[in-house]
Amino acid sequence: MTDEIWKRDEIESPCVKICVIHPDARLCLGCLRTPDEIATWSRKSPQERRQIMSELADRAPALTKPREGRRRRKERGRSQTD
């Protein structure tokens, strides 16, 4: 895929090509949209897209809690049994 699709003027998008959905918050780590918003983005009106984009900054705090990795869960489990 070329980058031309990302440069089209008719579709405003907050996409930054970091497409990873946070498992708990259910938000894209790159653009902060929900999977449903991403899937239906091209079918939304410009007004709907602008409305969503205006709300994205408010969603960032949902991602500030660090995810606990396997090692940390394992360590925590050991300390609770000690």
Image (cartoon, rainbow, N blue to C red):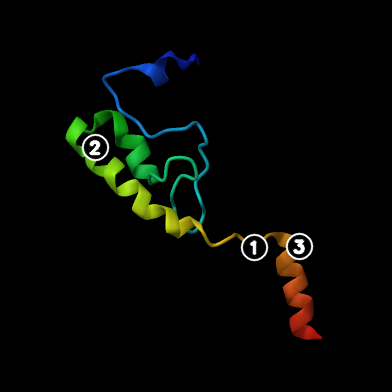
Closest to the observer: 66 or 38?
A: 66
Residue 58 left/right relative to 22: left
Q: If you read the primary sequence from the N terminus, does the residue marked by circle 2 or circle 3 appear first?
A: 2
Label 3, label 1: how far apart the Cα atoms are? 8 Å
Image position of 69 with respect to 77: above or below? above
- Residue 56 spot, x, y in % from top left: 35, 47
The residue carrying mark 3 is 71
Crowding around mark 1 (Cα neighbors within 10 Å: few <14, some 14 to 19, many 20+) is: few
Q: Which amino acid does label 2 sit on?
A: Arg
Q: Which residue is drawn at 31% across and 33% down?
A: 41
Whole-number angstrom distance, CA of label 2 to CA of label 3: 41 Å
Q: Please, what secondary structure does the residue beneath circle 2 have?
A: helix
Question: Can residue 45 be seen at all in this image of the molecule?
Answer: no
Circle 2/circle 3 CB separation < 8 Å: no
Q: Which comes sooner in the sequence, label 1 or label 2?
A: 2
> Which label sits on residue 39?
none
Q: Which amino acid does label 3 sit on?
A: Arg
- Residue 42's x, y, as percent? 29, 28
Q: Which residue is drawn at 46% across and 44% down?
A: 28
Judged from the image, the secondary structure of the residue bearing numbered disc 3 is: helix
**Residue 8: quadrant of the picture:** top left
Looking at the image, residue 82 lies above or below residue 44: below
Tag 2 residue = 50
The residue shown at (25%, 30%) is 43
At which x and y percent is residue 71?
A: 76, 62
Residue 68 image offset from top left, x and y in percent: 64, 62
Q: Mark 1 points at which residue?
A: 68
- Looking at the image, residue 18 sits to the left or right of residue 6; the answer is right
Using the rendered view, name the quadrant where residue 15 is placed.
top left
